[in-house]
Amino acid sequence: MVDPQLSRVLKRVTEMKKQHLVTYGYVISHVTSVELTEAGATVLDCQDSRNAGVINTVTHKKVNRGIKDDNTKAMLIKASDGKWRVTKSISLEKGC
């Protein structure tokens, strides 16, 4: 990850820690399309996040959990080291 996505994620982690929240589990990616341009790449992914969510570290209760078909869009750039990095990731808030 790189900014602005990196800063957003780090800010959210800090906010969650203050509320005694952490993420758990794993997400399974199902990439549906990749579009390459001179500026970078756009990846559409139908993620299965049913086995992931947020849990309270004090009560050990799950606050929420993911869904089967989470339609996600990520924008990436190719860094000088040749590796692709996410600059922005958004949930499209509709099933795949």
Image (spheres, rainbow, N blue to C red):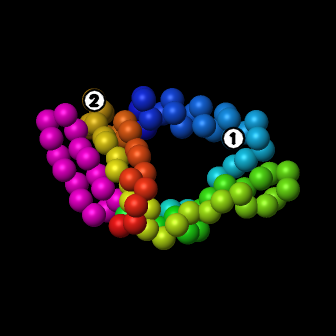
Disc 1 marks which amino acid?
Answer: Met
Neighbourhood count class around disc 2 (C-alpha, 10 Å): few under 14, some 14–19, many 20 upward:
few
Which is nearer the N-term, disc 1 or disc 2?
1
Q: Is residue 38 magenta?
A: yes
State whether residue 59 appears in this view: yes
Question: Disc 1 marks which residue?
Answer: 16
Residue 73, percent from left and from top: 34, 50
Above or below — where is 51 with respect to 6?
below
In the orientation shown, which residue stands out farthest toward the left? 38
Whole-number angstrom distance, CA of label 1 to CA of label 2: 32 Å
Task: Looking at the picture, tell me which residue is in the foreground, 18 or 6.
Answer: 18
User: Judging from the image, what secondary structure is the residue with disc 2 in?
Assistant: loop
Disc 2 marks which amino acid?
Answer: Ser
Q: Answer with left or right where residue 7 lies relative to residue 74.
A: right
In the rendered structure, which segment of residues is drawn in magenta? 30-45
Q: Quadrant of residue 63?
A: bottom right
Above or below — where is 3 with respect to 47?
above
